[in-house]
Amino acid sequence: MIEFQHVSFAYEKNKDVLHDMSFRIGKGESVGLIGANGAGKSTIMKLLLGLLEGEGKVLIDGTEVKKETLGEIRAKLGFVLQNSDNQMFMPTVYEDMIFGPLNYGLSREVVDKRVDEVLSRLHLEDLKHRYNHKISGGEKRMGAIATILAMEPAAILMDEPTSALDPYNRRIVINTIRELEQTKLIASHDLDMILDTCDRVILISGGRIAADGPAAEILSDRELLEANRMELPLSMNVHPYTSGA
Amino acid sequence: MDELAARRSPIHRLHPAAKLLTTIAYILITLSFDKYDLSGIVPMVLWPVLMFQISGVEVRTCFYKLRIVLPLVMAVGLFNPFFDRDILFHIGSLGVSGGVVSMITLMLKGVFCLMASFLLMATTKIDSLCAALRKLHVPAILVSLLQLTYRYVGVMTEELAVMTEAYHLRAPGQKGIHISAWGSFLGQLLLRSMDRAQELYSSMLLRGYHDHFHYADIDRFSIKDALYMAGCILFFLVLRYADIAQLVGGLFVR
Ligand SMILES: Nc1ncnc2c1ncn2[C@@H]1O[C@H](COP(=O)(O)OP(=O)(O)OP(=O)(O)O)[C@@H](O)[C@H]1O
Ligand SMILES: [Mg+2]
């Protein structure tokens, strides 16, 4: 479903952020993307969406990401931005939620039904008619996730979905992600969340893939994680003997 | 602003196109007054005041929100007294020159037009307004531009608020922003708001935005709306062409 073929990317000349990177994510997989600050996680997501353009090929469902195919590609992807302030642009949460689906030609009734479904799934009924500039950072994050879920995209990309969330909302988001059947790519420093939601993990370091494999394996590899400025997830730490490291 | 516009009142419920056209008519008629016609223009204040009353929007809010633009509008007329020194009439022994009269007239025109525009924005959601413009066959690209501009101004104000706050936290006891920081402050403001606008715009593109918004459905133009429009415009014309000051004055003199 998602494929990187020898992709390199630099924001400024001669400073490669990503270097000759290749990976492939199958339909329905859920993959965690981890790496230190500035490793290039957000950059990978933006390349997938065609917001940035690098060398090499990026394919979605076998279609190459380029100018002519952007419309088709973006219709398949939902992207939760790292900064929710930049995601919500309509006056209220509700108006933001209907924006995407209406653009894809769905009728008002269908969209309204979807909005209510998503809101109740995330326990956010109260947020529906609130003003985007008058809700807290975490509430805005939940709203942003809701706007993307309301689009029902074929694949969901999430950049730090649980940052800024309290434990209760974090748990709701984790459970919701687990229930989603779509292909998922989740970038985060919240390794416990990644462990809970992903089967596979890709670790980025120095512009390359440092590790790619089953989540339980990589996230229990203390040496590998610490070499890349990360720590074992708490749940791994508590049971050192079951970690398999 | 969006919040004011989401309130309910008879004015809020009117058709956006009716309000838009009425406001345009008001502005045109206000601007059409002669520059010495001070006594003619003063009664024009009646309409905005009446509308503030009916819509429940406070005049105070209006002046508070417009506090940045108002002085600019006022400043426009400021030089008139220097150019136009012919004495028009006397108050006691003080000669009032044409420049002073035209300055005040110009300022009033500006303030009235601002009040009227504010009323429109405060009682109509930007989305419905844009929908109305589309109904009036204004090209989609212009309407989208208007809406994007509206959003950009919002983003910029937000950034400005955040930056001012951050500045004051690290410069306690200072009033305003020190002049030495203005350059970097403005530059940052521009960069930051542009960055954010860029990201917001991509976020719109990612959700299937092409070149137009899907506007909220607006109701049909009803008799009520037509009546409101006709009534208001008639009122403006009366104010414009009947010499109210003389009429009122006549009442007392008799
Ligand atoms: N607009 C930009 N211009 C220049 N360099 C940039 C730009 N955006 C990011 N970078 C650089 O590219 C690198 C990768 O950034 P990216 O945002 O992809 O990191 P990330 O893995 O998402 O980090 P984080 O965990 O902090 O979100 C960083 O070194 C960053 O400094
Ligand atoms: Mg990032």
Image: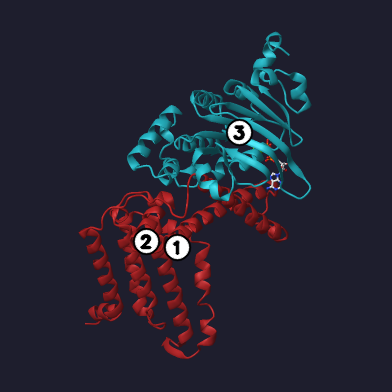
Amino acid type, mark 2: Leu
Left or right of residue B248, residue A129 in this image: right
Relative depth, front residue between A5 and A161: A5
Relative depth, front residue between B94 and B247: B247
Q: Chain of mark 1?
A: B
Q: Residues within 10 Å of mark 3 (few under 14, many from 20)?
A: many
Q: Chain of mark 2?
A: B
Mark pair 3, 1: CA separation: 36 Å
**Which residue bears the numbered disc 1?**
B142
Using the rendered image, report if marks 2 and 1 lie on a common chain: yes
Please tell me whether residue A125 is drawn above or below residue A55 in the rendered image: above
Disc assigned to residue A160: 3
Mark pair 3, 2: CA separation: 40 Å
Residues marked 2 and 1 touching at CB (< 8 Å): yes
Q: Colour of chain A?
A: cyan
Residue B35 horizontal/vertical position (percent): 42, 82
The C terminus of chain B sits in image quarter: bottom left
Q: Which residue is at a point 57% across and 54% down the rendered structure image?
A: B156
Relative depth, front residue between B158 and A213: A213
Amino acid type, mark 3: Glu
Residue A114 horizontal/vertical position (percent): 39, 34
Using the rendered image, report if marks 3 and 2 lie on a common chain: no
**Which residue bears the numbered disc 2?**
B133
- The answer to whether residue A1 of the structure is visible from this angle is yes
Q: Chain of mark 3?
A: A
